[in-house]
Image (cartoon, helix red, strand yellow):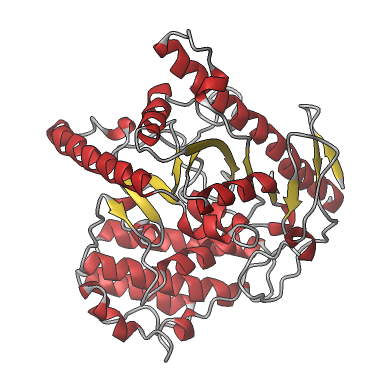
Amino acid sequence: MNLSTASSTTLSTCFPTPKASVSAISGLVDGGAACRRSWKCSSFPIFCALRLRGTPETVDDRKSFSGSGVAVSAVGSLHQQDEIRTTFLELPTEQELLLGIKKEAEAGRLPLNVAKGMEELYYNYRNAVLESGHPEAHEIILSNMAVVFERIFMDVQDPFQFSPYHEAIRAPFDYYIFGQKYIRSLIDFSNSFLGNNSIFSEMEQKLKQGENVILISNHQTEADPAVIALLLESTNLFIAENLIYVAGDRVLTDCLCKPFSKGRNLLCVYSKKHMNDDPELIDMKRRANTKSLKELAMLFRIGSKIIWIAPSGGRDRPDPVTNEWIPAPFDASAVDNMRRLAENSGVPANIYPLTILCYNIMPPPLKVEKEIGEKRVISFHGVGLSAGPKVTYLNANTPSSDPEEAKMVFAQSLYSSVLEQYGVLKSAIHALTTGEKALSM
């Protein structure tokens, strides 16, 4: 199947795919045998895409995380917070689950604002999963949300503190799989695309050779890490599981975010956008960022590390006039700092532009908010991910370039690639969505 885009790039799907079956699957995004074989999309040089297949899986975490395999009562060997009694896993219905929130709030064990956020999250997630048409949607909703509520409640009782470099917690409770299962049910895999898969394979080769890889990316939602991992796990599992994200402090302090953040490899920093929110905390934030930079420098010296950073400093937002979503411009200084830090490590570094399109499933507030605890709007939709060719500093500039101008040109080169790939993904995903709606009318 070929799709022509406005940028004259032809987007080819590797095989025709019917609307995804809504039966339970093994838990991986199944790209099909054709995706695992060597393939070429010869119709264009810039962008090759896999049309992804997959379905939300039934997540019976009452069995997965409270049965004989990994008992919730046994997880205390890793964190004291996991010794806290369970509350939500034993509640089998929607009414009981929501009543459980109310009871914990009335007992003073849940702050009222957190309880309100949990209830709001439940209804939004429920409505989004029901959009998928999955025959077991209600079971998926209850099972996933019971585990989410349990993990939120446990963290409220004994807050987890993230270190400057946080490694994903995979045992005895696997927070990575927990996050994957939750977001998987929000993705329409029949209308999702992975672009330039050969470039991701090139990255893996660089990593195997001991080199570092830096992904200069746009940022759209709190779900970005899960979306990236879900689209890569059937073709590039090493990247999916080992990617290290430069994360802002808000996903490390928001009670509704923290359980999902535990399942990712994170370098924790304070964003420029929120650096001055509280003048009394500015010095503390700067010291914390310095510690994180030292951790990053150490990781680069070790080698074989892949780092994701969004140099815009935050999530993309729609244009206030056109209401169109486009990647936010990159901060040239942030890009240049990352480049110089990697180059000074003594280990070869490879910088690639990365584009993600997933704002539909969990769009941020229209404006940047100072307060923690934003409203989560959630929907079921197709998503996309694509990598552009490697960009080198020397190729983007001439040796005689002014240093300030040079870093601007380098950042713009990466940003332009992200914009180009974004346009292709947008044309593919939204063209199909519009077409399907027209056919259903």
Q: Return the x and y of residue 212 as percentages of the image width and height.
A: 46, 44
Task: Give the quadrant of residue 44.
Answer: top right
Q: Nearer the viewer, residue 152 or 377?
A: 152
**Observer-nearest residue: 270 or 381?**
270
| Position in image of residue 262 (x %, y %) | 36, 61
> Can residue 248 be spotted in the picture?
no
Residue 94 placement (x, y as % from top left): 48, 75
Q: Residue 191: x, y in percent?
A: 73, 52
Up-down relation of residue 229 to residue 313 (above or below): below
Q: Residue at x 31, y 31 (%)?
A: 272
| Furthest residue in direction bottom, as rendered | 68
Residue shown at the point (38%, 62%) measured from the top left: 168
Q: Is residue 296 left or right of residue 439?
A: left
Q: How many marks?
A: 0
Q: Is residue 107 above or below residue 67?
A: above
- From the viewer's perspective, tell me whether residue 208 is left or right of residue 15: left
Whether residue 395 appears in this view of the structure is yes
- Give residue 359's quadrant in the image: top right
**Which sits in the foreground, 340 or 21?**
340
12 left or right of 77 in image: right
Residue at horizontal 45%, vertical 49%? 222
Quarter occupied by residue 132 = bottom right
Residue at the outermost left position: 280
